[in-house]
Image (cartoon, rainbow, N blue to C red):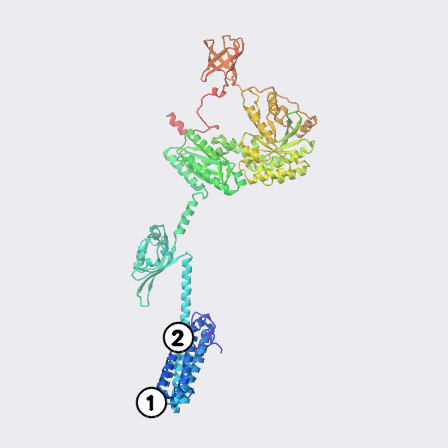
Amino acid sequence: MRRSRFARAVGSSNEAPDRASISEALWFDIRSADSPGDDALSATRVAALDHCAVLLGFTHLVAWIASLVFHRDSATTLAFSNPLVPLSGLLLLDVAAMVGIRCRDGLGLRPHHVVQALCLYFAMAGTLWIFAGSAMAAQSHAGHPSMPILVLGGGVMIAALVAVTSPPLSAVNLVMIAIGAMAMAQSPVAAAGAALLSLMTLAYSIAGARTMIAAGRQRQNLDAEARKALTFVDEFENSGRGWFWETNAEGTLSYVSQQLADDFECDPKALLGRQFTDLLSVETEAERAVEQHKTLGFHLSARFPFADVVVRAASDRDIHWSLSGNPVFDERGRFLGFRGIGTDLTEQRRSEQEISRLARFDSLTGLPNRALMRKTLDEALRNAARRQKGCALFLIDLDRFKNVNDTHGHPVGDALLRQVAERLKSVMGDHGQVGRLGGDEFMAVLPGNVDVGMLESLARTLIEQVSRPYTIEGHRVSIGASVGIAIGDPGRSCADSLVRNSDLALYAAKAAGRGKHCFYEAAMHSEASDRSVLENDLRQAIDRGELHVAYQPIVLAAGEELSGFEALVRWNHPVRGSISPALFIPLAEECGMIGRIGSWVLDTALAEAAQWPDTVRIAVNLSPIQFNDPTIANTVAELLKKNGVRAERLELEITEGVFLAEGDATDETFSRLKEIGVRLALDDFGTGYSSLGYLKKAPFDKIKIDQSFVRGAASVTSRNSAIIRAIVTLADSLKMDTTAEGVETHDDLHLVRELGCSQIQGYIFGRAVDGEAARAMIHEATVDPNGFQCVREARHRLMRRAIALIEGETREVKLRNISAMGALVECTRPVSPDTQITLDIVGVGPVVGTVRWAHKDRFGLQFTEFFPLSRLAPKKQKRNDAMMMRPYYLDQREAG
């Protein structure tokens, strides 16, 4: 049968008509449901028929008992003429129906299957009931002619009552009553009346079913909407974006979300019945933002709607909510209470506070950031103007921090910055505020601190503490710090000028060799301008051909045979002339030019070495920045191949700076260079951050002894010979060559030979020359030493007065050419050699010596002990190496 328009729309529409159609009501219970909603409704209707078999079975049992009582004589008859036979069949059928209804779920029967089975049950029961009724009517005793009619009438009534809830059952019941009436009724009028009554029962059943089905669908729609609403509520509350609340007319809570109860660490039931306002505390600031004169209590008492009122929970924890609510009235206008929504603002407020903090503090170290430090400096200067006290500014830059980042990665670098920040705060203490500007730059503002001595001491302590080694994730890291200091005069300095001056002082500290501090002085402005011009000139020096490579010979110590040359870059400026490498090499490292210059020097040196005999080596310096370049090994290999030079002839000289941020990248670079086949030399050994661990791990072929240990090593007062001997012994044990740098005198040459150095480099065998001169030296095979015999000790040229005790007689004398070992003495009294004399030098103190020679009014005195020339220096106020500006107001106060 075709479904009605409503049936087709069931499940897809939120609205249902007031009544179902007659056709749908008649067939609904025995037709398979087309939607989950109809299926559920069918199950509900079938549940109303659970006891139909019980009622019918009870009716049939009464009829059976009545038949047994009134028809005892036929109790043993088994024919259908005996009413007990069909009635017994009815009872068995009733029992089967009861069992089937009870076990329908286990049998997998759907609701329409159950109704279909019940229709069959009603038809069979009706048939047996007709037989039983006919038998009872035929065997009625004359004394009880109405008993069968009563029994049959009662059965028909119960059947109609049971079937009235289901039109299909009513229809079956109608058919069975009509057949029974025609079979048993003696009057056509009685049969027609019974059929009419059954028909009316069917009509009533259809009408009830139409209403019930429509009402069921409407209820399902409402339930679906309610479930959907509850789902939305649950999802909204579980999402953490908000929660719901409700009060009754008295203002007590009638509904509380779990989230609100969680904020009070209790069960929602514990909050029900409490006054809503008892849980809240309105924030004054939030109220003024909404409406200053209206509080939450006013809204609740006046029954006014409100929105986004910020309140604080009456809890020990710092919890904030944003509440919105509306009053609820019934159809008669009676106030029922408030219903509303709440939002947790706690995390939002924390986020706002964190954003505010991040706007003023560095997220990595927790120190004040650039903006807050600028504000601090402005306030310090304003306060200095009011109090007539100056303000000092430290600009701090970490030395070699980039190597740590490049070698170990940024996580280690970040951990290092945090430790540096802690050390800076510890050093600065109450003297001033430390902040981080970004990267590896820090700033310290010291309000009211202008004492040069105190600032200098603080700067030295700061550098010392920052330079102590760090241990991070198992790595030992060493860095340094440079400090630029500027002092601001009260009322005359501005923040911009103070920052600029401290920046210039910082650059001067770095130029002085890093790990130093420097005070600002006016000359630094011109130096900065000159440095900027020089940097621009250096960027164009290669293209202009102003750079060239010079070659200094390296000689075998045993036979003075030429071993090779060291390539040294030189800059001949068209205006300034020759510029020292000590000036432009650090400048190239700072401005990022060292990589390009280094590659050009290596290429040029290899091109020159290609013209030399295959036994002559070429040594080229690699800066730490070049060495830390991941492509350095590829660059070296390409240039060797380009110029056709064997890798064994190239010797790369590396300083100890490459080990400051030692890690896997450093070891990998060493490994790749050794795979190429080049030789590696450790340059300037002993002057930097010496560690025997370098020699244990790095595959060096040579150690170069720095010239500071070699020059003057032959002097009897020097202990450098012991240091050279130790280095040579260490190198021999590790099967490494040694080169003594800076050999200038024959005495030093003789010493380093005796100590076992493998090679010698220095002015005694020649200065750095151009390529043509180098090729000429190669043709001569050997190099003859040419230099002074010894190095004359430093002497103090100024005359000093002294009181001499000569053979018990005191006399005033004059001292000239004072050295660490002796002096020339002018004395009017004649003395003899080997005479021991005690001198009391004015302003210095006593010194004892022996006369070695004497001539007229002069004699030479050799001191018994080593005499430090520093004792002759005038006593000065302790100051920084660089000239420092003294605030004008201090001079005025002292003058006053």
In depth, the one of 493 and 360 nearer the eye is 360
Mark found first going from the N terminus, 1 or 2: 2
Is residue 543 in view from this perspective? Answer: no
Q: Is residue 839 above or below residue 295?
A: above
* Residue hosting label 2: 48
User: What's the amino acid at mark 2?
Assistant: Ala
Q: Is residue 503 above or below residue 136?
A: above
Measured from the top left, where is residue 759 in percent x and y? Answer: 63, 27
User: What's the amino acid at mark 1?
Assistant: His
Decide: marks 1, 2 in contact (CB < 8 A)? no
In depth, the one of 805 and 801 nearer the eye is 805
Q: Is residue 182 above or below residue 721?
A: below
| Left or right of residue 558: residue 373 | left
At a point 53% along the width and 42% down the height, the residue shown is 409
Q: Residues within 10 Å of mark 1 (few under 14, many from 20)?
A: few
Q: Quadrant of the C terminus?
A: top left
* Residue hosting label 1: 144
